[in-house]
Amino acid sequence: MSGAAEAFVSHALSLRWEAMPPAAQEAVKTFLLDSLGVGIAGAGSPLTANVRQAALAWAGAGDAHVWGQGSYRTSAANAAFVNGFQIHCQEFDCVHEPAVVHPMATILAALMATVDREGDVCGTELGAALAAAVDVATGLGVAAKTPLKFFRPATAGIFGATLGCARLRGFTQAQARNALGYALSFASGTMQAHTEGKPALPVQIANAARSAVMACDLAAAGMEAAEDSIEGPFGYLTLFEDAFDVTPVVTSLGKVFRIAEVSHKPFPTGRAAQGGIVLAKQAKAAGIAPGDIASARLTAPPLIKRLVGRPAQAGMTASYARLCYQYSGALTLIDGHVGLKDFSAEALAREDVAALGRKIEVVDDGQTNPAAFTPQVLTLTLTSGETREFTINSLFGAPADPLSPEQNEAKFRECCAFGFGRAREDIEAAMITAVSNLENLVDAGRLSRLASGIME
């Protein structure tokens, strides 16, 4: 087993909640609540019904819960698949910006399905497994030194999710090593779906979550797998990244807790669109009316141009529009906000948004950092000939400009109401209390039951 693989396995199996600094413990609670809420909200996405229908054909009843309205129990692997899809399908889940990884979608879906099946996991054990899994998934992203071509939230996420599940199942070093080897065998997901704006992106997340459960099942059954799964000649980093340096990541394990580096998404869009949304909100607050705008230019790092610089299209899907700044920027300049309800067929057909969107362009600022999200500048040329400029140097929701606890709770409640189809104040309050007192949560499976709509 290579140095990185061995270090990741040891870290995942040995990390203790009590050894984590308070900031990391608080970050676990923050993003656990956020991700549960976003996963519940995913139940309100029209495409979720299609995914559930497909998943029902793969397995029948089981011990694991699927979240939100119309929930049902199924196998752990299938629950991980559906919940993983729900967490990511509306682009509302948290992200580690330097790694370009959405860690909690794959990881939480797999870990909660495992919690359901194991039935004897306390809150601190779940918290430590989450933190260690995030260290692994985001560490692989941080180790990469070139732009992503594979969909890192899935391809790196599966390794973190697998070791998190291995931890919850009490695996030995040898079992966890084999599970990691099967994660390599199952790792998949490209950026082509992103380029085309297709819902295959959250399906890739879903597949990674399910595959993490399956990788552990194979290891538990005594199946051996590749040992040098990270740095080997055909290991993950060698095959999936053009250049990498994993040594600093390995050295940081147990010292740097990357869950504390994760960013919220304040808006249900691709993270690359969110700086521009904040700038458009600033312009709206400054009193600039949509009719006064002759043209708009968002100047930002190349990742922004690449990920959300696509043109708005007539008849575009919600998956496409969430990754299109011409849509989200124009919507914000008109309405002042972007929310979960702004991606319905009716909303996407708004002519006033389309007309203003055609005036927006996204420009690459020429930076060489392939993972940079800032700085960003929105330049508005008005019909009067005046030019107005708005600038940000960090993204709202990032550690440098985080959501407040009140904003985090408000987002959680909005997500729950959207996913359940109505406000469920009893469920919301119970989940907030359980997560905030994670140290005293005897049965972590209660979170999954609450997320599925079962009030105890």
Image: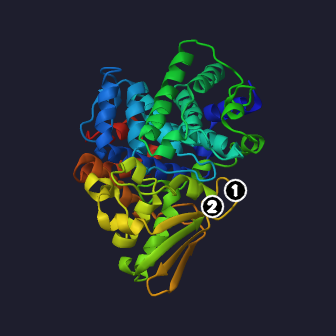
Which residue is located at x 75 percent, y 27 percent? 2
Give whichever of 348, 139 is nearer the camera: 348
Q: Position of residue 32 (x, y in %)?
A: 46, 47
Q: Which mark is residue 369?
A: 1
Image vertical order of residue 141 relative to residue 75, above or below: below
The amino acid marked with disc number 2 is Pro
Image vertical order of residue 387 relative to residue 377, above or below: below
Which residue is located at x 46 percent, y 28 percent? 210
Give whichever of 294, 269 is nearer the camera: 294
Q: Position of residue 224 (x, y in %)?
A: 63, 14
The amino acid marked with disc number 1 is Asn
Helix, strand or loop at mark 1: loop
Q: Are marks 2 and 1 in contact (CB under 8 Å)?
A: yes
Question: Could you tell me which quadrant the N terminus lies in?
Answer: top right
Distance, label 2 to label 1, CA atoms, is: 8 Å
Residue 390 horizontal side relative to residue 84, left or right: right
Q: Name the residue carrying label 2.
A: 301
Would residue 46 be visible to someone looking at this image?
yes
Which residue is located at x 61 percent, y 20 percent? 175
Residue 207 horizontal side relative to residue 40, left or right: right
